[in-house]
Image (cartoon, grey):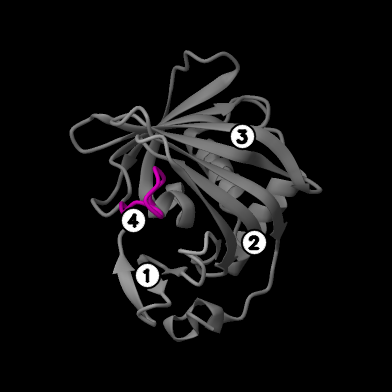
Amino acid sequence: MRVFCLAVMTWLVAAPALAGEPTAAELLARYDAVMGPPTFESESEMTAYREDGSHRTYVMKMLRGEEDRFRVWFKDPASARGQEMLRSGDNMWVYLPSLKRATRIANRDSFQGGDFNNADVMRVNYTQDYACERVDSAVADTYALVLKAKSPETAYDVIKLWVRKSDGLPVRGEYYGTSGQLMRSAEFTDYKEFEKGYTRPARVVMRNELVKARRSELVIHAMHLRVQAPPQRFTQVDLGR
């Protein structure tokens, strides 16, 4: 696993642009490497806009460790302060300080009541979760991919992605349910070089296609790669500490 992660990161830094006509698998691996590096620490916020005109912003610290582990700390608003989320492999939990215990959550559950789901934020591993093929793109200067879920446990049944031909960075995503209905759409913007050789969209806007007045915006303010996190940081007993 560590060898694979190092290989992905080496390719990510050394070859930021895609040459020739890449395969669907290469494009998807590029997406995973950009949107979910093997290890990182970030400072971010998500603002959820609701149909009644209200909105709420969540300020977060995120940490991803080796072996596909992920942890989120909520700093604001006051009502969410002290809450944490944890993922280890296929398992996810939310920790509520008022209860002083963790409760299981699912990939498809809403992330803090917004329009991202838990997997959108805490599990970017499309290569493992989806079969992929390239299709004709109607968007200029992009490649288009269609992803089909390998398991009913995934967040979506079908995903369509558009990535830039110049460097493979994502432009747009569409997310479909079991009935084939479009549930969400995403716009990837504000491309930023967070570290030398590592550029990604700093802003992702997820629109609710079922309730048009709803959307959520995830903004990355800072991101550091290749962090070293002790394994115990990704255990239930460490939540709340």
**Image position of 51 (left or right of 69):** left
**109 inside magenta stretch:** yes
**30 inside magenta stretch:** no
Give the amino acid type for the residue marked by disc 4 in the picture.
Asn
Whether the residues at callouts 2 and 4 have beta carbons within 8 Å, the answer is: no
Residue tagged 2: 40
Q: Nearer the viewer, mark 4 or mark 1?
A: 1
Q: Position of residue 60 (x, y in %)?
A: 57, 59
Residue tagged 4: 107
**Image position of 196 (left or right of 23):** right
Marked residue nearer the N-terminal end (3 or 1): 1
- Residue 169 visible? The answer is yes
Residue tagged 3: 169
Q: Could you say which quadrant of the image residue 4 lies in? A: bottom right
Q: Position of residue 139 (x, y in %)?
A: 52, 15
- Please report the bounds of the magenta region as a residue range: 108-117
Marked residue nearer the N-terminal end (4 or 1): 1
Marked residue nearer the N-terminal end (2 or 1): 2
In the foreground, 237 or 74 = 74
Helix, strand or loop status at disc 2: strand
Q: Main secondary structure of the magenta part?
A: loop
Give the amino acid type for the residue marked by disc 2 in the picture.
Phe
CA distance for labels 2 and 3:
18 Å
